[in-house]
Image (spheres, grey):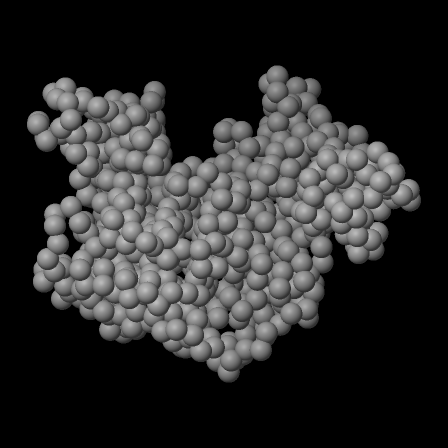
Amino acid sequence: MDDRSHFAAGELVSVLTAQPLDRFLDYQAPEGGVFLGAYVQVPLGPRQVLGVVWGPGKGDFDYAKVRPVTRVLDVAPMRAELRSFLERAGEYTLTPLTAMLRLATRAPGLGEAPSMRKIYRLGNAEPERMTDARRRVLEVLSEMGGLSLTQGELADAAGVTPSVIKGLAKMGAVREEEAPRDTAFPRLDPDYGGKQLAEDQAAAAQSLREGVASGRYGTVLLKGVTGSGKTEVYLEAVAECLAQGRQALVLLPEIALTSEFLTRVEARFGAKPAEWHSGVTVTERRRVWKQVAQGGAQLVVGARSALFLPFRDLGLTVVDEEHDTSYKQDEGVLYNARDMAVLRASICAGRVVLASATPSLESWANADAGKYQRLDLVSRFGASVMPEMRSLDMRAETLPSNRWVSPSLQSEVLARIERGEQAMLFLNRRGYAPVTICRACGHQIGCPHCDARMVEHRFLQRLVCHQCGETVPKPEVCPSCEAEDKLAAVGPGVERLAEEAAELFPQARLAVLSSDLFGSARALKEEIEKIASGGADIVIGTQLVAKGHNFPLLTLVGVIDADLGLQGSDLRAAERTFQLMRQVAGRAGRAEKPGVALLQTYQPEHPVIRAILSGDEEGFWQAEAEERRAAGMPPYGRLAGVILSSTEAQEVFDLGNAMARQDAPLRRIGAQVYGPAPAPIAKVRGRHRVRLLVKAPKGAALQPALADWAAQFRLRGELRMAIDIDPQNFF
């Protein structure tokens, strides 16, 4: 392709669409021509589809059959930096470029004219009769100095119902106008609300500011104990980025964190940033997408998919809680947002800040090798100190078989309640019970579409498959032997733990935090705010509670089953258990009162449990790194997972065996193939699943070898193949 930036009317242009064709299509440039990177609408069969002009057309078939571009969309063209990022990310993850484009165009209605909404300003007329509610509306509008508000904003600010505003509009006391929705976001002021930082915070912030000001690529691992002020430090880097006139992106691992974080951003910069996550409306997503491309959004706070927005000039990307597994996309395009953030920054000369109290071993190793700069915050901000951590040896505790809160933990919780403090009981298992078994025949109720047990959710009065989402009413009789009243719940989930806590602490106010108990992000946000303001005595939660929440009154964390993550053969079991326990323990004692974290365990002598309690994080990472290095496992070797699936079990095994035999492209780079073997969950959504694992040396050219290997096999019928570079789990 040549490097022209504009194509005249009638010239052939190559258009990439988001359709699953895995090739470019030739079209004629429309009247007036078209720019490289332009978003266009093109005919494809009987349909009109979205595409991007990627370069000059090939012209390798009859020109008379080439159809013209239907129209050029009124949005900023895709910049060369984003096109390069999509190409390189696709090459790394072995993903067709058409699928990568789908990630970058997730804003419905891009081709539509800007939609309108009603806004309200102060009118000239006086209301016929003044009421207290009407007076409040007029006072709010008067205080805004002529600025407009939406009906919802005005109703909230004045504390009235929408009918009051509509009534004033009919009288002329309030002017109702139409305004476009896709407007720029309020400007953020980098000098607005900076805080006084402690000495080590100030030093780290200065280093980050200097890196951003340099205008060169670089990645920094910002490691700080929970409560050490990492957020305030990297917001200083955001401030420097905004002062330089560039855009910034902050990725968060959980939608529940956005509300509290947005409040902190507003306090720091005087206005709220743009949001991008699944809880944002379709209309707002389109607005964010367009304003990011036009430069009307200086800062975006979002989930991993925000990384594919069309930034005009991305100068800084912050990956908060960079160790979190939710940054790995496990369906569709299989990518790790942490790694893709580094790739995009290297292309656009931006900086990356990876922030965590418990970094991933990959990031720790890159910092150890000098690839990343490392900044450490070693103490908590202000008067708070790190919590004391102790184990409770469950072998020495006496409790009934249907109880999970030990007497020792129970007494500690009671002491906190009596002092007006909060306690947290942590169990990383959703629902009421993980297994429902028949006591007559031993049958365990499984999902009809998956090779997985159904989890009882008593709150819903249903059994739920956590693999495919299938739900069924809780049966009254055994589906196998039809015995009545013989079905029993086995093992605890957070709902069952809440039931036990209600019996043990009848006077306590309980709050349960689990992702499946809240119908919306707003409801979850309200519950978190309620807890933070003292609206609960005992918080019961899954790993959702371990992610960045600040509960000032919380002084005790009790981990119900600290051994849970150590079971099985997961490569990262030790690392993840260490991270999760340290993170959840860090919720305690974040204000003036000291905190305690108690870990119930049957293996207090286990090396991971001992490392968690001792706080020797560097020692743990060194030992874990040496084990991985000796085994040639990531980050000191390379892995790729191959997942084969079909509705027929035999054909998926036949393909797996053929791939294992014909592995010459992999052997040429020194790689080994393990398998095929049934996936740990061998059937999901009615499809049988087989896995192969490819292990290669650190410097091996793995992706080209995998592409050559996979190209030997043609997938027919229901057969599907997915290749996962750097797999994070093995399900």
Q: Give the residue displayed 38% in from the left and 76% down from the top.
A: 385
Whether residue 46 is visible, yes or no, is: yes
Q: Give the residue displayed 57% in from the left and 38% down from the top.
A: 106
Q: Give the residue displayed 30% in from the left and 36% down from the top.
A: 457
Query: For the view shown, which residue lies furthest in the top direction?
Result: 46
Quadrant of res 450: top left
Is residue 20 left or right of 275 when viewed as pictured? Answer: left
Q: Position of residue 54 (x, y in %)?
A: 62, 39
Is residue 71 left or right of 16 when viewed as pictured? Answer: right
| Relative height, residue 592 to residue 21 (above, below) | below
Is residue 508 left or right of 309 when viewed as pictured? Answer: left
Q: Nearer the viewer, residue 31 or 362?
A: 362
Q: Nearer the viewer, residue 291 or 53?
A: 291
Whether residue 176 is visible, yes or no, is: no
| Relative height, residue 136 to residue 606 (above, below) | above
Q: Nearer the viewer, residue 117 or 710?
A: 117
Q: Quadrant of the N terminus?
A: top right
Q: Position of residue 424 (x, y in %)?
A: 33, 58
Q: Position of residue 60 (x, y in %)?
A: 60, 28
Query: For the view shown, which residue lies furthest in the bottom direction?
Result: 199
Q: Position of residue 729 (x, y in %)?
A: 30, 47
Q: Give the residue displayed 19% in from the left and 43% down from the top.
A: 491
Question: Total of numbered circles in the picture?
Answer: 0
Q: Quadrant of the C terminus?
A: top left
